[in-house]
Amino acid sequence: MHTRHAPAAWRWRSAPLMAATLLTLTACRAAEAPTLDPPMAPTASTVAPAAPVTTQALPPDFTALMKRVGPAVVNVTTRRAVAINTMRPDFPDDPMFDFFRRFMPPPPSGQREFRSEGVGSGFVIDAQGHILTNAHVVADADEVLVRLAGSQRELTAKVMGADPPTDVALLKVDATDLPVAPIGDAAAVEPGEWVAAIGSPFGFANTITAGIISATQRSLPDETYVPFIQTDVAINPGNSGGPLINTRGEVVGINSQIYSRTGGYMGLAFAIPIDVAMGVADQLRKEGRVTRGRLGIGIQPVNESLARAFGREDTRGALVTSVEPGSAAQRGALQVGDVILQFNGKALDNASTLPRLVAGVAPGTTVPLEIWRQGRRQQLEVTVDAAPVASRNQAPGNTPGPRAGESDTARLGLHVSELTPAQRRELGVDFGLLVNDVQGDNADSGLRPGDVIVAVNQQRFGSLTEFRRLLDAVPDGGSLAVLVRRGEASLYVPLDVNAG
């Protein structure tokens, strides 16, 4: 590889040219300097007010931080076997197929095995050789190798356990007296605070980048248990699993995800709070898996329209959209349409907080709930179940419906039809109205053709007549919430009620 340099003549001419320019400017200023009269004693009218003194905060120096934490950051290399079909494709209608068949030898038939490598980061959390990284870094790996900072020696690491829902994995290497990364308090970080990341972007080991905390307690799609720390630190492929560090040299998070349209850094990076990661690591070290609490309900946020429909003055809490038969929630008398305001003594400012609180409770523990039901607060108790091995939620499909028994509900702008007995059995409901069309003021409500309405607010209905009766009880200009089945999911949708 050749490196282009500036021509020698250009390099040598630059300095004299700059010096000549500076001399010229200096000479001009000296020649044009005016003659001043002797200085006079200042008077009150001639004294100018002092200019305000301003100070500008400078970015912190990260050299001490790098020296303190850098040695504890490791490069993680994964290897796995990948089988590839090497049989020649059979395209007899392609004119080039006959050419290849005649003049090129066929490749070996069957499958060939190749070795695939991946690169990530991690950091040592104790002197016994335990290392934290991301679960996606070591997923499906046949072999995991760890290389310490400033060393060419690779150590074979054992995967003690991985937890895909939080994207945390715990590794162990047979080594002692390793440098350990100091652990900080993720709850203390604030937006605007300086932080740094150390990792192996694109394989460049022990690279440090810096930025600020952009937000905390960030919820991401399909991420139930992690209140992410959002930063603008430059994070790229290979940084995954590396530490996010505050200016005191303490790890406050594990870099896990980026938002990108190109696959590279775009200023949006997300880290797992270190307290969440250490809690997962402790369970993986002791049990090899993570146990979480579970209620067995579906929930959704409460927006202003839903709050009005349920008689609430604010949007706090989690709205229950489904209760699984035989679940902890059903045994505790939770109902669809309840708004959970507190769980185990902790208020829910938003719905996304509830799964994290429930997950943190040991199965078998009985906890108090405060709910909103039928316009008033109520107290319940529920004994938390154990959650099964978690997996990513699958996107619900649409439920096709009949066109028989159709009816218009003009006050809502809906065109609905009753479900057939076979469709009711498939969905596991006693009765439902299939939405065929949504018009008028509710066209942008979020209700879709294919949705199945099974309740109004907290009341089920068994016929179209009962549905109309519930609708007639709402005055013109009011609002209501319909409970909808959408594939395997349930959710409430607020609707405006207009004059028919």
Image: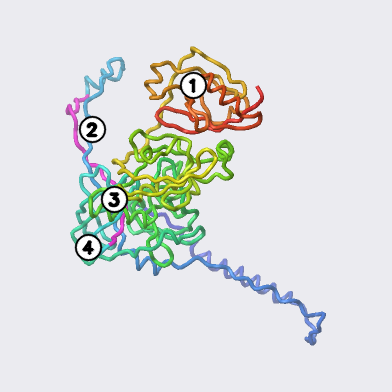
Residue position for label 2: 84
Colouring method of the image:
rainbow
**Residue 145 image offset from top left, x and y in percent:** 23, 52
Amino acid type at mark 2:
Ile
Name the residue carrying label 4: 128
Dot placed on the residue nearer the N-terminal end, 2 or 3: 2
- Precedes in sequence: disc 4 or disc 1: 4
Q: Residues within 10 Å of mark 3 (few under 14, many from 20)?
A: many
Query: Is 111 within the magenta?
Result: yes
What residue would you read off at disc 3?
Answer: 169
Q: Residue at x 45, y 55 (%)?
A: 233
Per the model, the C-alpha gap separating discs 2 and 3 is 28 Å
Q: CA distance from mark 4 to mark 1?
A: 61 Å
Q: Residue 131, which numbered label?
A: none
Q: CA distance from mark 1 to mark 2?
A: 49 Å
**How far apart are the two marked residues, 3 and 4, measured between alpha carbons?**
16 Å
Q: Nearer the viewer, mark 2 or mark 4?
A: 4
Please tell me whether the stretch drawn in magenta is mainly helix, strand or loop: strand
Q: Bounds of the magenta span?
A: 104-125
**Label 1, on which residue?**
433
Using the image as rendered, state which of residue 172 and residue 305 is in the foreground: 305
Please report the residue visible at 65 percent of the width from the left and 70 percent of the height from the top: 25
The image position of residue 148, as x and y in percent, is 26, 60
